[in-house]
Image: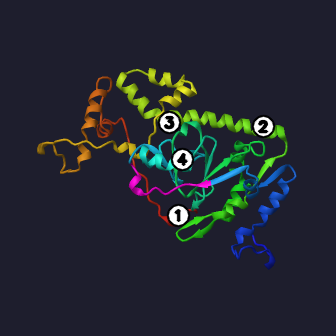
Amino acid sequence: MIKFWIQSDKLRDRIFIPKFYDPEITSRLRELAVTHDCLVFDHLMIRGAVSVATGDEIGKAAYGTGDIPFVRTSDIVNWEIKAAPKQGISEEIYEEYAKGQDVQEGDILLVRDGTYLIGVNCFVTRFDKQLLYQSHLLKLRVNDKAILDPHLLFLALNCRIVQRQIRSFQFTADIIDTIGARFFETIIPVPKDESLRHLLSSRVQTALKDRMKGKAFIKHCPMLMEEVLRTGSSEPLARFANATEDEIYEVLQHETISSEFGGFESFWLYSDQIKDFILIPRYYEPSIRRELSTLAQFCDLRSFGELRDAGMLKYHTGDEIGKMAYGT
């Protein structure tokens, strides 16, 4: 908590929220100006060096219609898009919006609406393939790499002084917070030293490439593990580990949380097969039985209950400590 005075003629756009005028931000930017070029985002847009776009709200009826990711604010974690975003959409819906959204490798998606997620961002990689993004996200694209390297922009967006600026722009709007057009006032510090810029850009590219392959493994892991269990061999894992980037790209499949629900299948069930008065069809999903029958060739099939009773496994639940404890 800091306190400070501000002259009335320094107030802007009738904004009376103290954090908007945080003097420590101004002081820190003044210090950085000695060793950095401090670029105003709005000025970069006017020069055409950077462009900004927002996504679309496709409606809940589109959720779960396919496996092409519809990226929402909660799907951006640890500077990347989740390996399995929550909602998937169909090819038809994707084609309807894809041309307008025009997401490309090298774009940056940044959360502009929400609460604690505002300012969270990610770098779109080749392995993200097709996707659509919602209207609560901004898509940032560097058009002139001679003025600003996209990897340096990504790095700068996640540094403390830029995140602090974004937080100072965050105001409550109805039921959620937003940074609105105030984001364009953000000042991006970029090192003046050209050798340092090249070094930082190179390190970011290397880190992104390593994470990209790791993310591809996470995304493909459920299918690899099933293949291992079905064949009784670890060869599928070794094959994936030795694959080139192009080979991984070709075999990589989209997976979303809704993929777990599977497709629709109708089937008959005799009344004496009903267990514990459970009348929910998916509980008796026949494809699960078929898969387990295949796995039984190379695997011992044991339920969690059996493992627990045999003393091979323990499991416990956590506690609800109450919201009053949060933030203490």
Q: Against 201, is 70 above or below?
A: below
Crowdedness near tag 2: few (<14), some (14–19) or many (≥20) residues, C-alpha within 10 Å: some
Residue drawn at x 40%, y 52% is: 62
Q: Which residue is mark 4?
A: 99
Of labels 2 and 3, the one closer to you: 2
Residue at the far right: name it.
34
Q: Alpha-carbon distance for marks 1 and 3? A: 34 Å
Q: Is residue 282 magenta?
A: no
Of the pair 233 and 262, the residue shown nearer to us: 262
Dot 1, crowdedness within 10 Å: few (<14), some or many (≥20)?
few
Q: Amino acid at mark 2?
A: His
Which range of residues does the magenta coloring cover? 53-64
Q: Position of residue 230 (x, y in %)?
A: 35, 25
Answer yes or no: do the residues labelled 2 and 3 have beta carbons within 8 Å?
A: no
Q: Residues within 10 Å of mark 4 (few under 14, many from 20)?
A: few
Tally of numbered tags: 4
Disc with the residue nearer the chain's start (4 vs 2): 4
Rendering coords of residue 226 (x, y %): 38, 30
- Residue marked by disc 3: 218
What is the C-alpha distance between the residues marked 3 and 4?
29 Å
Q: What residue is shown at x 60% (from left), y 59% (from top)?
A: 112
Q: From mark 1 to mark 4, how far is it between C-alphas?
A: 47 Å
Most extreme residue toward the bottom is 8
Mark sitting on residue 325: 1
Residue drawn at point x = 77 percent, y = 61 percent? 25
Q: Are marks 1 and 3 in contact (CB under 8 Å)?
A: no
Circle 2 SS class: helix
Q: Secondary structure at mark 1?
A: helix
Q: Which mark is residue 198?
A: 2
